[in-house]
C-alpha cells in the first residue's frame, strides 16, 4: 500500500505548512520532528521484534518519561492539531511521515514509508536509545540490535547536521553545524576539518561535550566524536565528507529501514491505534 493517496498528501501538506516556526530554535521544527520519528522507531529490538514505531507507544509511560525522549512532548504537541484534523491517520504514521516530510526537502525518501497499521502496542522498556555520553562499543550494541552495520551507524549519525541540543532536554548545548536547518554532509566535514576540545563549563557542571577550536560556536557529543575515534567508523566519515551524494543515498536507505522497523500491517484496518496492551515488558 503506498502513502501517495490524496488523503496522505493532505496530511503532508499540513505538516509542511507548520515546519517554519519563527521564534522556535532556528525557526524550523523539522529537526525535532526528525528526532521524534527516529526515537519512535529506534526502540526496536531484533531479538524479539518488540518496540519500533507501531502503536506510537511513546505516548505512554515509561517510554514517555524516558530521559532520552526529553523534549519530544514538544514535537508531539506540534503535530497534535494535524492528528485532530485527520483522525484517520495513526499517531505512528503521523510521526513517521512528519520525519520524512521534514527531510524530504533534501534527501529522496519517497516510497520508503508506507501506511502502517499498528498491531503490536506493547510499550518497550526504557534504555533502548543511545546514550550520548558513551562510545563506539555502545553505538554498535544499540544499532546492532536494530540490525544496522557500522556504515549505517555513521550514515544515520549524519542527521546531526540538523538541529541542536537543548540544556533543558538532554543537558547538552549547541549546534553541530553553522547551518542547522540544512541537511548536508557538514557533520562529517566538521568532524574531520576542525579541532575539537572538551568544553569547559564555567558556570555549571555540564556534561562532557566537545567544541571547535576557533569560533567555538559548534559542538559534538561524545558519541559523535566516537565516529572519528573509532578507525572503522572513521573510514565512512571520510567517505561521506568527500561525497555528499553517497551520504544522501546511504542515509535515505538506512533512515527508511529505521522507520520500518517492527512495522506490521493489516490492509483492512487503517489508522487503528490503541493504548498499550498488557503490562510493559521488562528486560
Ligand atoms: C538531537 C543523541 C542518533 C537525529 C540529539 C540530542 C542528543 C542526541 C543528546 C540533543 C537533544 C536535545 O537536547 O534537544 C543522539 C545519539 C545518537 C543519535 C547518542 C546515536 C548515534 C541520531 C539519529 C538521528 C538523530 C540516528 C536521525 C536519523 C537528531 C536530530 C536532533 C538530535 C535531528 C536535533 C533535534 C532538535 O533540534 O530538536 N541527538 N542522537 N540522532 N538528533 Fe540525535
Image: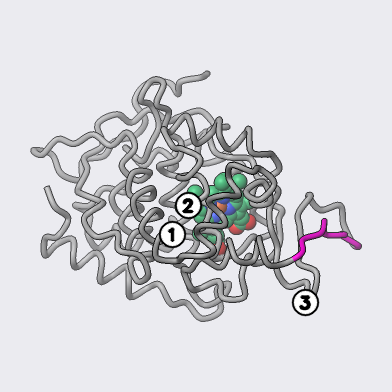
**Residue numbers of the magenta segment:** 195-202
Residue ID for mark 3: 215
Q: Tell me residue 275's x, y (percent).
A: 34, 34
Mark 1 residue crowding within 10 angstroms, few (<14) / some (14–19) / many (20+): many
Res 187 quadrant in image: bottom right
Position above or below: 220 against 30:
above
Asked which secondary structure carries label 1, the reply is: helix
Camera sees residue 194: yes
Q: Are marks 2 and 1 in contact (CB under 8 Å)?
A: yes
Res 77 quadrant in image: bottom left
- From mark 3 to mark 2, how far is it between C-alphas? 26 Å
Residue ID for mark 1: 247
Q: Nearer the viewer, residue 94 or 2?
A: 2
Could you tell me what secondary structure mostly forms the magenta stretch?
Answer: loop
Image color mode: one colour
Residue ID for mark 2: 155
Amino acid at each position: 500500500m503506498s502513502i501517495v493517496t490524496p488523503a496522505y498528501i493532505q496530511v503532508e501538506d499540513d505538516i509542511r505548512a507548520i515546519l517554519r516556526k519563527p521564534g522556535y530554535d532556528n525557526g524550523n521544527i523539522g529537526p525535532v520532528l526528525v528526532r521524534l520519528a527516529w526515537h519512535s522507531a529506534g526502540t526496536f529490538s531484533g531479538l524479539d521484534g518488540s518496540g519500533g514505531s507501531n502503536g506510537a507507544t511513546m505516548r505512554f509511560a515509561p517510554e514517555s518519561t524516558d530521559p532520552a525522549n526529553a523534549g519530544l512532548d514538544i514535537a508531539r504537541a506540534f503535530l497534535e492539531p494535524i492528528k485532530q484534523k485527520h483522525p484517520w491517520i495513526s499517531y505512528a504514521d503521523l510521526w513517521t511521515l512528519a520525519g520524512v516530510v521534514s527531510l524530504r526537502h533534501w534527501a529522496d525518501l519517497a516510497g520508503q514509508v508506507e501506511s502502517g497499521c499498528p498491531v503490536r502496542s506493547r510499550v518497550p522498556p526504557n534504555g533502548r536509545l543511545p546514550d550520548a555520553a558513551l562510545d563506539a562499543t555502545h553505538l554498535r550494541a544499540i544499532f546492532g540490535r536494530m540490525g544496522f552495520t557500522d556504515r549505517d551507524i555513521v550514515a544515520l549519525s549524519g542527521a546531526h547536521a540538523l538541529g541542536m541540543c537543548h540544556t533543558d532536554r538532554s543537558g547538552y548545548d549547541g549546534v553541530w553545524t553553522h547551518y542547522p536547518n540544512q541537511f548536508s554532509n557538514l557533520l562529517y566535514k566538521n568532524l574531520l576539518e576542525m579541532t575539537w576540545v572538551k568544553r569547559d563549563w564555567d558556570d555549571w557542571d555540564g556534561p562532557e561535550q566537545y567544541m571547535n577550536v576557533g569560533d567555538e560556536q559548534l559542538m559534538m557529543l561524545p558519541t559523535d566524536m566516537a565516529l572519528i575515534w573509532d578507525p572503522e567508523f572513521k573510514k565512512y566519515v571520510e567517505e561521506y565528507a568527500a561525497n555528499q551524494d553517497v551520504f544522501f543515498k546511504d542515509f535515505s536507505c538506512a533512515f527508511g529501514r529505521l522507520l520500518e522497523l517492527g512495522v506490521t500491517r493489516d490492509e483492512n484496518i487503517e489508522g487503528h491505534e490503541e493504548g498499550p496492551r498488557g503490562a510493559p515488558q521488562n528486560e
